[in-house]
């Protein structure tokens, strides 16, 4: 089963989306986006190596196989980039994406760096956002606030119950996000 995120509801009415998920793990959220949204191309960035995040060591290599298998039905819509965020981003032209969903290393410096690197890759009017704007990942809220304050960007956060409560953050590049509604009964 995939895991829908509050972020996805910002894109439900859009067509032919080209976007990126940075941090893919087992592909659960990627699968949901591909199931629910009108996606033309979804770039999937994950190095699948050992990394340290908020004091915990993660070794996610086993998830690479799971994700690749899970997302096979959508292989004509996905492009895998097995690299860190910093290395992957150089492959993208500025303003080439409709959205960037940032869910990689949740430590402050990585979230700040990812937001700073990927925002220019999103078109004006497109959406930048990410996951885990929660007290257990304090670096996320700190980085998003600092980046947005510095660049005079108005962002929002949205809690969403999907087994447990999780909170996404997002902003619209060069504009206002508008309403961020999650329709009742649409929790999958
Ligand atoms: C929280 S999980 C992603 C979950 C996924 N977005 C979902 O909701 O199904 C974090 C992932 O980020 C990846 N990651 C860690 N550091 C990274 C980096 N520097 N660049 C890109 N991905 C990274 C990890 O390998 C891990 O698979």
Image (cartoon, rainbow, N blue to C red):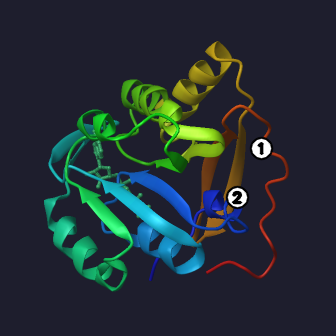
Q: Is residue 138 visible?
A: no
Residue 163: which quarter of the image? Answer: bottom right
Q: Position of residue 68 (x, y in %)?
A: 23, 74
Instruction: For mark 2, give the secondary structure.
Output: helix
Q: Position of residue 29 (x, y in %)?
A: 46, 67
Q: Position of residue 113 (x, y in %)?
A: 40, 26
The residue lying toward the viewer, choosing from 3 and 84, is 84
Residue 26: which quarter of the image? Answer: bottom left
In this picture, residue 78 sits left or right of residue 69: right
Residues at marks 2 and 1, CA–CA distance in whole angstroms: 8 Å
Q: Is residue 86 visible?
A: yes
Quadrant of the image for the N terminus?
bottom left
CA neighbours of label 1 inside 10 A, class few (<14), some (14 to 19), many (20+)? some
Residue 80: which quarter of the image? Answer: bottom left
User: CB under 8 Å between callouts 2 and 1?
Assistant: yes
Instruction: For mark 1, give the secondary structure.
Output: loop
In this picture, residue 116 sits left or right of residue 74: right
Q: Which residue is mark 1?
A: 177
Q: Which residue is mark 2?
A: 10
Residue depicted at 66% across the width and 35% down the height: 173
- Mark before the other along the chain sequence, 2 or 1: 2
Residue depicted at 57% across the width and 21% down the height: 147
The residue lying toward the viewer, choosing from 39 and 56, is 39
In the depicted structure, whether residue 55 falls above or below residue 49: above
Return the residue found at the far right: 179
In this picture, residue 151 sits left or right of residue 117: right
Q: Position of residue 184 (x, y in %)?
A: 81, 76
Residue depicted at 58% across the width and 67% down the height: 16
Quadrant of the image for the C terminus?
bottom right
The residue lying toward the viewer, choosing from 127 and 145, is 127
CA neighbours of label 2 inside 10 A, class few (<14), some (14 to 19), many (20+)? some
Residue depicted at 37% across the width and 57% down the height: 43
């Amino acid at each position: 089963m995939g895991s829908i995120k509050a972020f996805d509801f910002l894109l439900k009415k859009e067509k032919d989306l080209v976007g990126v998920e940075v941090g893919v793990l087992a592909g659960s959220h990627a699968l949901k986006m591909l199931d629910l949204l009108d996606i033309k191309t979804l770039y999937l960035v994950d190095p699948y190596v050992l990394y340290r995040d908020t004091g915990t060591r993660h070794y996610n290599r086993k998830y690479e196989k799971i994700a690749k298998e899970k997302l096979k039905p959508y292989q004509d819509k996905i492009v895998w980039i097995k690299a860190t965020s910093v290395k992957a981003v150089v492959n993208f032209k500025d303003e080439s994406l409709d959205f960037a969903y940032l869910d990689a290393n949740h430590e402050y410096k990585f979230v700040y760096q990812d937001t700073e690197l990927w925002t220019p890759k999103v078109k004006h009017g497109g959406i930048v956002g990410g996951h885990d704007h929660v007290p257990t990942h304090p670096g996320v809220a700190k980085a998003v606030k600092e980046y947005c304050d510095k660049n005079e960007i108005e962002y929002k956060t949205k809690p969403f119950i999907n087994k447990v409560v999780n909170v996404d953050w997002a902003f619209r590049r060069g504009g206002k996000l508008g309403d961020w509604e999650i329709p009742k009964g649409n929790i999958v």
